[in-house]
Image (cartoon, rainbow, N blue to C red):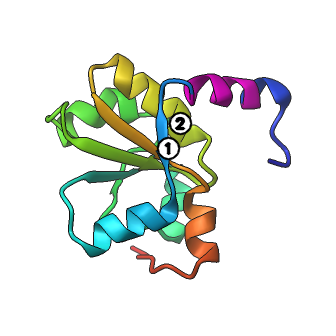
Amino acid sequence: MKNHNLSFLELVQSSLKDIEECDIHQVKAMLDKEEDFSLVDVREDREWIQGHIAGASHLGKGVIERDIGNVIVNKDGLIVLYCQGGFRSALAGENLKKMGYKNVLSMSGGFSDWLNNNFPIDKP
């Protein structure tokens, strides 16, 4: 949590009251079983091009609210959001819930934990 100011962390904690989390192992198991869900990377473009989880869609936090309806029309389906550490995904998830998406999870630990566990990634 280094370099994150207290106000930001408080905002994330507030979002996590409304957004449930899952961990990287749960997401990996869901991918391995080819379960039906949408995996969305909310990181910035520069982060996405350095590598991302295979099968993920990219909707950066700056545009996800604007563009989500063009990518995911089923507001009842499971959506798992991830970012680098699990903070931005929680914030984005809160807004998606406000927009009527009913089953939104934030991946705790984010892409950093994914990499630290040597799980596979794609690079464009």
Q: Residue at x 55, y 69 (%)?
A: 114
Where is residue 68, by image quadrant? Answer: top left
Q: Report x, y in % for residue 117.
A: 59, 77
Quick check: 51 left or right of 98? right
Q: Residue at x 15, y 35 (%)?
A: 73
Whether pointer 2 and pointer 1 mark residues with C-beta atoms closer than 8 Å, the reply is yes
Residue 4 belongs to the span the image colors magenta: no
Marker disc for residue 110: none
- Which kind of residue does numbered mark 1 sit on? Glu
Quick check: 50 left or right of 100? right
Q: Residue at x 56, y 82 (%)?
A: 118
**Which quadrant does the C terminus fall into?**
bottom left
Label 2 crowd (10 A; few <14 / some 14-19 / many >=20): many
Quick check: 124 left or right of 13? left
Q: Which segment is the magenta one?
A: 9-16
Above or below residue 92? Residue 21 is below
Q: Report x, y in % for residue 22.
A: 47, 51
Q: Residue at x 53, y 36 (%)?
A: 90
Label 1 crowd (10 A; few <14 / some 14-19 / many >=20): some
Q: How many marks?
A: 2
SS state under label 2: helix
Where is residue 55, by image quadrant? Answer: bottom left
SS state under label 1: strand
Determine the residue located farthest toward the left in the rendered image: 74
- Which kind of residue does numbered mark 2 sit on? Ala
- Main SS of the magenta segment? helix
Disc 1 target residue: 21
Disc 2 target residue: 90
Q: Earlier in the sequence, mark 2 or mark 1?
A: 1
Above or below residue 71? Residue 12 is above
Where is residue 56, by image quadrant? Answer: bottom left
